[in-house]
Image: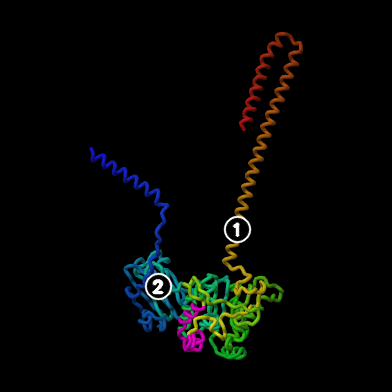
Amino acid sequence: MKLYHAHRKALRLFLCLCTAILIVSPLLPLPSVSAAEATDVTSVSNVVTSGFYNPPVVLDGSYRDYTNAYNGATVTASNENGIAYVYFIFESPAPEFTVEDTEKGEKRTFGGCGMIHELLDLEKAFGYAPKAIRIDLDFQIAVSEIYLFSSGELPDWVQVWEAPLTESDMLLLVSHSDDDQLFFAGLLPIYAGEQGLKVQVAYFTNHNDVANRRHELLDGLWHTGVRNYPIIAEFPDLYSESYDGALWAYANAGYEKQDFTDFVYDLIQSTRPLVVVTHDIEGEYGHGTHRLCAAATIDALNKASAPDKHGDIDGKWNIAKLYIHLYEENKLTLDIDRPLSAFGGKSAFKVSQEAFEYHISQHWTWFYGWLYGNGTDITLSTQITTHSPREYGLYYSAVGMDTGHNDLFENLETIAEREERLEEERRAEESREAEESRKAEESSRAESESIAESISISEAESIAAASSENNSTSTTAEKVPTGDKTSHGKLPAVAVLVAAMVCVIILLAIQFKRR
């Protein structure tokens, strides 16, 4: 018996503890759970390629070399733990192609996005990480590298590019793949990386003749915080030392002056930027393509601002500001040496220095010493005495002149700020409408109650008047000499009717009082 009571006591204590845990647990903070990092499983997977001229190149871990597949290629891979991602480094954008889960026979389509660094999210596409896949590249293609990853959060160096912007806060238009990290050093780390604005970068020349420069371009942009894929013109990189020299060189290659204006105009219309930033009118150190890029931007601005032959400017996007590097009027000096939280306290200038490290093919040029120093290390942008990346001028503004804040977005509402304002206005409008609806409902209820009250009083008055009239008729009837038998026969009936009416009136009065 003692053992029985002991068991009951223990059970009661256990139930109390469970109850206490259930009550207290919602109040306790949950432990933070970080997603597991995706692992590069290329080397531990069974990968077989066919159709490539030099197959080992695509798995050597470097995009410095590539191999062609002149008649298409096939890649098969298997891993017992699943393949969640495939990361392709192409030499040119791939058209659409298929990936098949060879165990289940299911297929998904990828490619056709115009990017040379393309991540295939198999886990998202299939709903799981396939254990065995087959990739059919049924076209001529050149591939630098293929990486396979397990499920989890991808490493920072894997580039998951978004499509070019169709609405942007800033458009940075530069001539060459490294200019954005040289003459515009610090600009992208501040506005794309730190502030998270919608920044679109575009290049006036394509470097198709130097394969590695296109990969260097993407690696440098990614490092500064840019996440929308760049727009690259079809114009080749031709050197000249003057504006006229640039026109002559490109004319020999089959291009006219209007081609450059049209490119920039279409670029502005497709990306709809608030602010445009481009090269020095004098081409920084005199480069003809830099000058041509700046001139084409000014021409495109004038084209967008001018009405057509019918005097109509509707449908044309007109930018709010145009900043030109080193422009002497309405000058602005960016602080690119201050620490940025998005980059662990590094300065914007330091981040651009790191980004230029990816441009290995250009390290032999004089730019290397200009950016990093010759003999004395350059650690601050203020140490650069020529073509300073800090100096800009406001060439055009539709929102008034700058007042010394040294911010490209002075007097402007960014896209995020506009969306936040519109959301607040929407919420305020919903609140106003809800309040008006509540007041209207209250007013309608009060009006209904008033009408009901009026009807009740009116009914009571009508009944009372009818009763009074009946009483009067009864009294008159008593005075008419109609004989004893007739008079005595009607009196009880009248009395009953009057009593009934009085009861009805009393009941109505009581009912009215309750309301």
Q: Amino acid at mark 2?
A: Val
In percent of width and height, residue 120 lies at 42, 71
Nearest the eye: 261 or 360: 360
Magenta stretch prevailing secondary structure? helix
Dot 1: few (<14), some (14–19), or many (≥20) neighbours within 10 Å? Answer: few
Whole-Å distance between the Cαs marked 2 and 1? 42 Å
Asked whether residue 234 appears in the rendered view, the answer is no
In percent of width and height, residue 157 lies at 43, 74
Q: Residue at x 64, y 46 (%)?
A: 440
Q: Which mark is residue 426?
A: 1
Magenta residue check for 494? no
Magenta residue check for 356? yes
User: Which residue reaches farthest top?
Assistant: 484
Q: Residue at x 49, y 77 (%)?
A: 221
Range of residues picked out in magenta: 349-376
Task: Say whether marks 2 and 1 touch (CB < 8 Å).
Answer: no
Give left or right: position of 185 versus 329: left
Q: Residue at x 70, y 28 (%)?
A: 461
Q: Which mark is residue 86?
A: 2
* Vertical order, 29 against 217 (above or below): above
Asked whether residue 366 appears in the rendered view, the answer is yes
